[in-house]
Amino acid sequence: MADSAHSTTADTHETGGTRRDFLVIAGNALLGIGAACTAWPLVSSMNPARDVIAAGAPIDVDLSSLKPGQQILVLWRSRPIFIVNRTPAELKKLQEPNDTGLLRDPQSEVEQQPPYAQNWHRSIKPEYLVLVGICTHLGCIPEFTPEPGGTLGPGWPGGYFCPCHGSKYDLSGRVFTGVPAPYNLPVPPHRFVNETTVRIGENPPNVAWEFGSIVQI
Amino acid sequence: MAVSQNKLVQWIEYRLPVFSFLDHELNEYPTPKNLNYWWNFGSLAGIMLTIMILTGIFLAMNYDPNVGDAFQSVERIMREVNYGWLIRYIHMNGASFFFIVVYIHLFRGLYYGSYKAPRELLWMLGVVIVLLMMMTAFMGYVLPWGQMSFWGATVITNLFSAFPVVGKDIVTWLWGGFAVSNPTLNRFYSLHYLLPFVILGVVGLHMMALHQHGSNNPLGIDRKGPQDSVPFHPYYTYKDMFGLSVFLVVFAIFVFYFPNVLGDPQNYIPANPLHTPPEIVPEWYLLPFYAILRAIPNKLLGVCALFASIFILFIVPWLDTSKVRSAYFRPIYKWVFWLLVIDAFALGAVGAHRPEGFWIYIGRIGTFYYFFHFLVLMPLIGWFERPLPLPPSISEAVLKKKQKRGGEGALTGVAATRSKP
Amino acid sequence: MRPHLAMPALLIGAVIAVAALAQPAQLARAQAAEEGAPALPDVSWSFEGPFGTFDRAALQRGFQIYSQVCSTCHSMNLLTYDDLAGPDGLGYTEAEVKAIAAQKQVPTINKEGQPAMRPALPSDHFVPPFPNEKAAGAGFGGTAPPDLSDIIKARDGHERYVYGILTGFREPPKGFHVPSGRYYNLYFPGHVIAMPPPLQDNVVTYSDGTKATLDQEAHDVVTFLTWASDPTMEQRKQTGAKVILFLLAMTGVLYGAKRRVWSDVEH
């Protein structure tokens, strides 16, 4: 049309710009938005599906046959969960300054547990410990090694030993200094439905705590 | 046009000349200025291929290629996976729309003589793509492992048993068992994932061949100079994007409101090797070929006709003897072309119906005419037909058309065209 | 025809042609099986049309019919109990769904590793009436009653067909032989069906006080089955409306952009 004096594309781009560009820019913008919106369902489809989330619903574990000093292992959301019934002697040892002095985070200050487990025994009831059994170093499963001494040396107070890179934790999952693991073992949300049944994956009533806020699993 | 002054762009360009490549193939690439909307379907086909590959990759993340799990895993995608229903419906309807687009693209090539010298290889590569698409679509249809998946696979693989001597061995080899079974499903899945990337490769060659001599155009005459062409970008990029947008509206109506209309309800019944459904029908895009297969009352000849109906397209550039490309200037061939289109639809209808009564005759007449068109009409009409006089150049034809329409500003036509360095 | 209309017209034409071609593929079966079959009953549904949604009360009544009547023979293997919960489901709360699931028993292994039964959880699939396909077929002359999860999607005629079957039991016409243990159904291909009439007036008592007529029951259970076949329908239609509106706007703008770009070229 009237623009015929400009005879190259470049010219039109630069000088004829203001006139035609609103529609062109809007068109480009809509194409961009459309492409981005199209990407969303694809990306979203890789998140856990409904059935996967449903399979991660809380589970109930009966503790009536778990004797003091024993551990059972259950699976919740495809993760190993340790449940230990600790003996009074073991509980006493958790509070001894000789041992707690060797811990990296004895007061459980890093958010590796729900608020109701931020105490010296890292649990609701002192004897029953519930942990996600995944080393905070690189994701191996630490071994339950409750007997003091043994192959881990005379100073070993009893706890968890990770076979992959030698990380050590005490019997409430607190990590020792001088090992590669940086944090205490995580405590999942849990509550007691009755005296001997623990429900893993659900907070006690009136507590709102997100499992996802744990610093390192 | 010089590549950007941006230092990073220049650094990359010096080592990997992608920017000058894009500039050359988009900004400088001269395209006839008179392309009509039928020319949109090439880029649309490319976009459909991209959509199919993308959605397919995400479907594959949740699909189980095992006869015990395949059906459930597809239903799980529809019911449990976030937006799984959307991805699956896009992929499922996308197959149909891919074929719609490619068939229109193919018939456009036939009408405007886009297969003629020097674009014979361009055309043949296109036929290779159609062939690969059919194989991919067929194997993809097997994956949900519904009744039509299973029995469609059984019927189509059994076609090969028609070949003498080696037929049975080929079929067993295709199956990897004594019937369509788990090994068959596994290999179909593997190939269904592979073939689209082979198609992508052939599309690359198709584009190379296209850019060698540039697009044909509705007049079918060569570009004589810069006044006949415009750079691909921005002219055809925006025209293609507009066309894409229209296309997506139609596509979205099907995906969101009629997602199962183009499919067969029987495929929502899990495959049952002990029970054949009352009617086995292929997907609509294969119906004309299915009709040709059934039109011939001899198994081997039917299979041969089926393959011939596709392979005949390879030699179309040499069957057409006309000196003129575009049917626009071919008063007789123009009508014969539309007869072929009608024939294709008729064959499609025949493929959808039981071979009974008058459908048998329609099928035979349609099949005969299909081959008659290519083998007899195409060479003959080229010889005796007197084409209309061709315009001297694209720009003059465009100008004349504009004047005839009482067009505005007729004189600016030549002046406004781009003079490319 | 103006050139910018050519493209939409072309596409829509091609798609209609294809849809027309695809439909006979399905209809051929019905026609071939049954020349002169009566037209399926045409009743209205809450889920029809581009803005249709599922009537939640009808869904809950339909689920009641399924649980009390259909589920004695028909499985629904693709559904889980928690599909019933929430606004995308039947509108039940999670506690209600938990109670519904807990009424059923599913196989498990106990502490000693022996087969045992436990109450179903919301994440479990609908418990089938028979332990396996063979057992399902045994009572019915070898052919198991079809799974109902996808039944609406899996039949020509869809909801109208299933509604037709449920309401289509009649006395056979004079001279029409129905073998013993089989029933005459107006809409079933060939008219001879193995399923005894499952519904009749007051086969259930609705908890919401709705009068349980045969038509009402059939309508409710078909609504439920349609939801079961296509639980994402509402999400699909709502998303579709937004997507199409966006695309129409984009089409308009791109048409303008295209005209702008081409405004200085004769073409």
Image: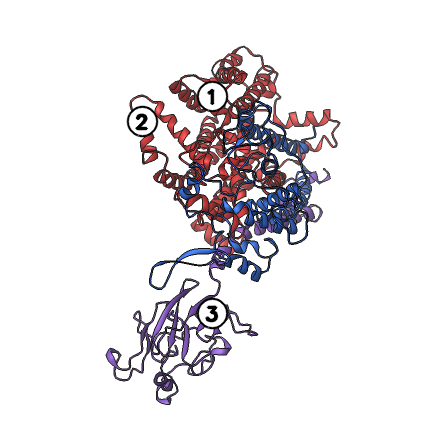
Which of discs 1 and 3 lies nearer the camera? The answer is: 3
The local secondary structure at tag 1 comes to: helix
- Identify the residue at horizontal 75%, vertical 32% (top origin): B408
Q: Which residue is mark 2?
A: B168
* Tag 1: amino acid: Ile
- Judging from the image, mark 3 belongs to the subunit labelled A
Q: Which quadrant would residue B226 be assigned to in this image?
A: top right
Q: Which mark is residue A199?
A: 3
Q: Position of residue C257 (x, y in %)?
A: 67, 43
Chain A, which colour? purple
Disc 1 target residue: B292
User: Drawn colour of chain C?
Assistant: blue
What's under tag 3, amino acid-wise?
Arg
Q: Which chain is red?
A: B
Query: Mark 1 or mark 2: which is in front?
Result: 2
Q: Where's the C terminus of chain A, which quadrant?
A: bottom left
Looking at the image, can residue C194 be seen?
yes
